[in-house]
Image: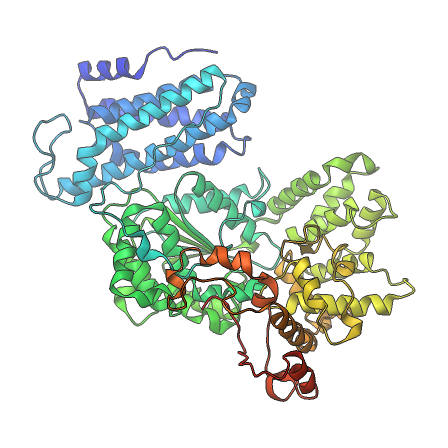
Amino acid sequence: MHSIARPVNIAAQGINAAGDTTAQVDSLVTKILGTLSKFNSVVDKIATIHPYAQAAWAVLSSASKMIIGQNARDESISALLNKMENVYIFITQEDLETIKSMHIVITRICQQTLECAYFLRDYAKAKSYCKSTTKIIPLASSSPPFSSGSRLGKNFISEADIRVQQYNTVFDDLMQQFRDQVVRETVLVTHRILSTVEGIIDDVGLSGMAYAGGAGLNMDKICLAGTRQGILDEITAWINNTEDDAARVFWLSGSAGTGKSSIAHTIARRFHELGRLGSCYCFDRNRGGDLRHEKIFTTIALDLADRDEQIRHALADAVRRATVLKNTTDITQQWKELLVKPAQQLSEAMVGPILIVIDALDESGGADSRKQLLRILAGKLNDADSHILKLPPNLRILLTSRPLPDICNTLGDVQHVYPQSMDGISRASTERDILSFVSHEIADIMDSFTDRTHLTSLAHESDGLFEWARLACAYIKGDDYPGLTPQERLDAVMSHAPGDRVLLLDRMYMFTLRAIFPPEHPRRDTILNRFRSAMGQILGTLESLSLHSLNAMRRYFPDEDSLHPVDLIVKPMGSLLNGTIDSSIPVRPLHASFREFLTDQSRSGEFYVDVSAIQQGLSFASLGVMKDQLRFNICKLESSYLPNCMVQDLNNRIACHILRGPFRGFVFNPTSAGGPFGIKTEGNFVQCLFDGQIYLIYSHMSINT
C-alpha cells in the first residue's frame, strides 16, 4: 500500500502562501474532475461503487464554472478540493483487486464525495445569490458574515468551515481504513438543511397520524447488480439536476413485468444510502385493505419528518393547529397542509436533492381512487398555493405506473413531468440485462445444460419481460417441478415462448400452472375446484392473509367441500405466490399480472377464479371467527374514553390480542348473494351461530378506526 505524499493541511498551507486566486481554484477543480474521471474508468464494472462516483463527477462537472467563480477566495473550499484530489490519486494508484476487496470503504468515500459535490455546488449558488443582494464578506474575515441577505447565505458562510472540517475528518477516517484494510463503521456527513431548529419538537403531536405500514422500500425488489445501468443513470442525473427549470416528476411507465418497480427500488436504495430518500411509497393491488390511496401524503410527510427535524417541527405545528389532518382521507388537504406548506418554509435551507418515490400508481385501485392524486402531481388543482411547483426544486418525485389511459391523459402533456417509457430502453440493452439475470438465477445448475446458447435465446424470447424470465428460471431450476432435467425444462419453456407481451406472460402462467397441476392427473377436477376455492379466498380478502389465518378461516366455511387445507394448493406455488413456506407470512401473488390473469376468464381458461363466488363462504367464516374469538375490550384497553391516537401501544395490543387475519382480511359484500347481508336462506345458520343475539354488522370492517 502507498501513503498519501502530502497531507491536506500541508497542501492548504501551500495554497495560503501562494494566495487564493481564481486560477488556483480552477486548477484544483480541473484536477479533481480529471482524477474522478480516471477513477470512474477504473471502477466502471464495480456496481456498488460506480453510481456514486459517476454522480459525484457529474455534479461537480455541471457546477464547475460556478464553483470556480464563487469560491476563489475561500481557503477552506480550496483545502477540501485538494483533499478530494489527494484521496482519489491515492486510490487510483492501487490495483483493481485491492479496490474490489475494499469496495465497502471506497463506496463510502464516493458517497461522501457526492455529498461534498452537493455542498460545493449549493454553496457557490448561495454566494452567487448573496453577491447580487449584498457585499460578500470572506470566510477569513472577523466581521459578521452577511449583514443582509438570505437565511441560506448566512448559514452557508457562517458554517462552511465547520462543514469542510467534518468532511475532511470523514475522508481521513475512511482513508485510514483503506490503508489498514479494515472496514469500520463511519457516519457520513450529510447536510440537507443548513439551519438549526429552535425549541423542542412535539413528537406526541404526530402520534396517531395515519401511516401505511409496509409500503416502503423493499430490498428484495432491487435490480441485479450491473443491470439497468442506462435508465438508472438517467434517473440519477435527473435527480441531481436541481436547477429551477428541471422537471419535478420523473414518470417511468411500462407494461406489466418489464421491471419498473425494480428500477424504482434500486434508485430508492441508492438515495437511502446517501441519506437523501425522503420517502418510498408503494401501492400494491394485494393490499387493498390498507387503503393506501387515502394515506399517501400523511405517510410521506411522516417519512420526511423522520429524516429531518425542521420538517418534523413544521409538521407538528400543522397538526397542532388542525388535529383533523392526522387522519383525513382528503389527500388534497394532506398535500397542501402536510407537505407543501412545511416544505415551503424550508425552500431556502435545503441543500442537495431529496427524493420521493411513488411506485406502482396503477395498483392504487380503480381510476377514481387515483384521480385526485394525478391532478396533484400534474399541477391541475384549482388552487395556486397547492401547485406542485410550490415545492422546493430540490424535492423530486419518481413515479412508476403502467400506461393506463387515465394516467396518460393526465400526465402526458405536463411540462414539469419528465416522461420515460420502458419501451424507450433499447431491446439489445434489455436482452443483455435479462441474460445476466437468467445466468445469475440458474448459476447453480449451469453445468446441466449441453447447449448454453439456449440461455441467450431465452433472454431474446422474453421480449423484455423480467417477470417472464423469472418464471422461466423458477421452472427450469425445478424446485417445484420434479421429474425432468433442467435441460428438458429449458427446452419445454423455449417451445412455448413465441407471442406478444401479454400473450407471452399468459402462456408462461398457463405453462407454470399446468406443470404444478398436470392435465393428466386422475383427480384433476377435484384439484382444480380446490385451486379455484383457495385462490378465491386469497384474492377475495381485503388484506392478504397468512397460511395460518387462511386455514383458520377454512374451518368455518359452510360448504364441506371447502374444508380442505389451503396448503394443499398453495405449497407447490412458490414461483407464483409469496408466503408458501412460512405460515406466518401473508400469501399474495408475486406479481400483479398473475391476479389479472386468474380473474380474466378469457385469459386463464380452466384456471379462472371467480372471486365473487367465494364471498358468502368468507362472510360465514368471518362471522364464525367473530363468534369464537371476539371479546369485550379484546385489546384490554385501560379506558374506553381514549381515542385510538392516544393509546401509545395500540399496535402492540392488536398484535398480541387479535388474530390479525380473520378480522382485518374479511371482505363482506352485502349484495353478492342476495338478501340482507348477502344471506337469505342461511339466516337460521347466522341466528344459531350467535345464539339468537343481535349484532350490528358493518359492510366494511376495521379494528383501528
Residue 473 in the image: state x and y as whole percent: 73, 47
Above/below status of 473 relative to 403: above
Above/below status of 401 relative to 194: below
Q: Quadrant of the C terminus?
A: bottom left
Rendered image quadrant of residue 669: bottom right
Q: Is residue 462 visible?
A: no
Residue 395 in the image: state x and y as whole percent: 34, 51
Seen at 68% across and 56% down, the residue is: 577
- Is 578 positioned to the left or the right of 119 in the image? right
Foreground pick, 232 / 620: 620
Seen at 32% across and 58% down, the residue is: 339
Seen at 56% across and 20% down, the residue is: 97
Q: Name, please, the residue furthest toward the right.
A: 522
Q: How many marks?
A: 0
Residue 535 in the image: state x and y as whole percent: 71, 66
Foreground pick, 175 / 629: 629
- Is 303 positioned to the left or the right of 66 in the image? right
Above/below status of 436 relative to 575: above
Rendered image quadrant of residue 502: bottom right
Seen at 33% across and 12% down, the residue is: 6
Above/below status of 101 relative to 69: above
- Is 561 positioned to the left or the right of 668 in the image? right
How did the renderer colour the structure? rainbow
Foreground pick, 411 / 344: 344
